[in-house]
């Protein structure tokens, strides 16, 4: 039956309409990008040794490579204040300083996270930690967003495995919503919202994808995207800099395992936007924060039919067709070894 589910992390609702999953589809069918890319592409801006779009040359890097985004959406110095008519509540704007970085996950143009070893992904985790630390130490940087856009369908500009890091003065809307909800929960209960949620999900078991020693991957009760998932550390930590060595390895393994399930589901390189929500770098301790890694994949019923967030979703509320529980069932059936290797 149609019902609404509440997201306590963002204080918002999603409409769930399971009966709609069988409706006919004569709409847009996505073209699949070619699966067999070369390990090195001389025309790729991100491959080792190549020249980027702005003329800078990449080093001959061996594992990971991080650099300032040549087309950064945020700049450390606001050149000139954006001017608005004064004294009106309708035209408010303020300068926003920040920095943007690009992180190449591997020198290999043909790989993606699910095809990399946990040891190689661990190098990515290490860079996330050092970037969060270094960027967060700038006095004007109050929030660091680590994310990955994977697949052309998600607007990813280049198939070379990479992610981005944007750091800025303000706390953006999504993490701010989560901060407010976690703060309230912490004040009322003295425990993090996600520790208590995880405890209950582990008892119920129906939305758990897999459990590792230090991490759990699950489809949250309030998931919006058809195959949305979340990796949650069992230990409440505000930020990834608090991870132990063993937990860093665990995070790399959880990232690998989840993305293999994704790729195997439709035997395609599964697109998504994924990112880490964690405490701001505003100098406060933030014991309320329980960092977590969210995955928002757009595919709905096959490798070529995606969920469109339009119409009702744009005008009224988030809505999903297949239930989170059905998504878990499908994902759990996916093999543990990557389909290209079997
Ligand atoms: P996306 O694929 O998620 O768009 O990330 C790639 C980023 O890489 C993008 O933000 C940057 C783009 O600005 N980029 C460079 O900085 N230099 C280049 O030569 C190509 C792309």
Image: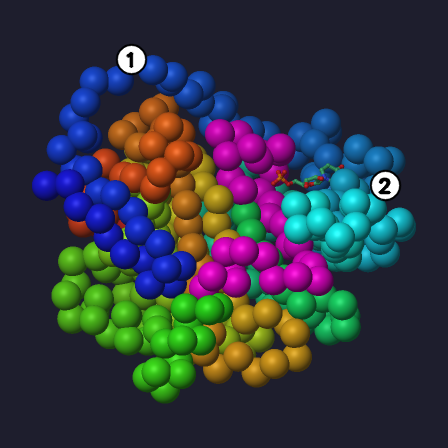
Horizontally, is 248 left or right of 327 in the view? right
Q: Which residues are magenta?
A: 149-178
| Nearest to N terminus: mark 2 or mark 1 | 1
Q: Extreme left residue here?
A: 1
Q: Is residue 330 left or right of residue 339?
A: left
Q: Is mark 1 within 8 Å of ligand 1?
A: no
- Image position of 226 with respect to 244: above or below: above
Q: Is mark 2 within 8 Å of ligand 1?
A: yes
**Disc 2: CA contacts within 10 A as few (<14), some (14-19) or many (>=20):** few
The answer to which quarter of the image holds residue 309 is: top left
**Quadrant the C terminus occupies:** top left
Q: Nearer the viewer, residue 281 or 164?
A: 281
Can residue 188 be seen here? The reply is: yes
The circle drawn on residue 56 is 2
Tag 2, which secondary structure?
A: loop
Please tell me whether residue 185 belongs to the stretch shown in magenta.
no
At horizontal 34% and vertical 83% (from top left) the residue drawn is 188
**Gap in angstroms between the C-alphas marked 2 and 1:** 45 Å
Residue found at the far bottom of this picture: 190
**Relative image position of residue 301 (x, y in whole percent):** 27, 30
> How far across and how far down the image is residue 271, in percent?
44, 37
Q: Residues within 10 Å of mark 1 (few under 14, many from 20)?
A: few
Q: Residue at x 77, y 73 (%)?
A: 139
Q: Which residue is mark 1?
A: 26
Determine whether 194 is above or below 33 in the image: below
Residue 316 position (above or below residue 133) = above
273 to the left or right of 194: right
Give x and y (percent) for residue 268.
38, 32
State which quarter of the image contains the N terminus: top left
Helix, strand or loop under label 1 = loop
Q: Quadrant of ligand 1?
A: top right
């Amino acid at each position: 039956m149609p019902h609404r589910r509440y997201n306590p992390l963002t204080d918002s609702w999603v409409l769930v309409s399971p009966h709609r999953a069988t409706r006919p589809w004569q709409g847009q069918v996505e073209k699949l990008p070619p699966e067999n890319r070369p390990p090195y592409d001389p025309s790729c801006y991100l491959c080792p040794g190549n020249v980027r779009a702005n003329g800078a040359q990449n080093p001959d890097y061996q594992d990971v490579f991080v650099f300032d985004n040549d087309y950064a959406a945020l700049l450390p110095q606001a050149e000139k204040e954006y001017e608005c008519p004064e004294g009106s509540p309708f035209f408010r704007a303020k300068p926003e300083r920040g920095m943007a970085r690009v992180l190449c996950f591997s020198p290999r143009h043909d790989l993606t996270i699910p095809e990399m070893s946990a040891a190689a992904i661990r190098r990515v985790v290490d860079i996330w930690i050092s970037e969060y630390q270094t960027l967060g130490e700038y006095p004007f940087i109050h929030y660091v967003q680590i994310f990955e856009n994977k697949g052309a369908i998600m607007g990813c500009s280049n198939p070379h495995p990479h992610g981005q890091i944007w750091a800025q003065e303000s706390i953006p809307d999504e993490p701010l919503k989560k901060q407010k909800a976690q703060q309230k929960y912490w004040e009322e209960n003295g425990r993090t919202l996600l520790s208590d949620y995880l405890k209950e999900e582990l008892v119920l078991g129906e939305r758990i994808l897999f459990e590792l020693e230090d991490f759990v991957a699950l489809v949250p009760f309030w998931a919006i995207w058809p195959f949305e998932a979340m990796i949650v550390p069992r230990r409440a930590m505000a930020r990834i800099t608090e991870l132990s060595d063993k937990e860093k390895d665990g995070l790399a393994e959880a990232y690998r395992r989840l993305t293999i399930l994704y790729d195997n589901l439709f035997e395609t390189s599964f697109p998504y936007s994924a990112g880490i929500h964690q405490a701001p770098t505003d100098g406060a301790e933030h014991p309320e924060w329980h960092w977590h890694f969210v995955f928002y994949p757009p595919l709905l019923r096959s490798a070529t039919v995606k969920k469109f967030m339009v119409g009702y979703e744009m005008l009224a509320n988030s809505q999903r067709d297949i239930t989170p529980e059905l998504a878990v069932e499908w994902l759990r059936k996916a093999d543990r070894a990557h389909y290209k290797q079997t």
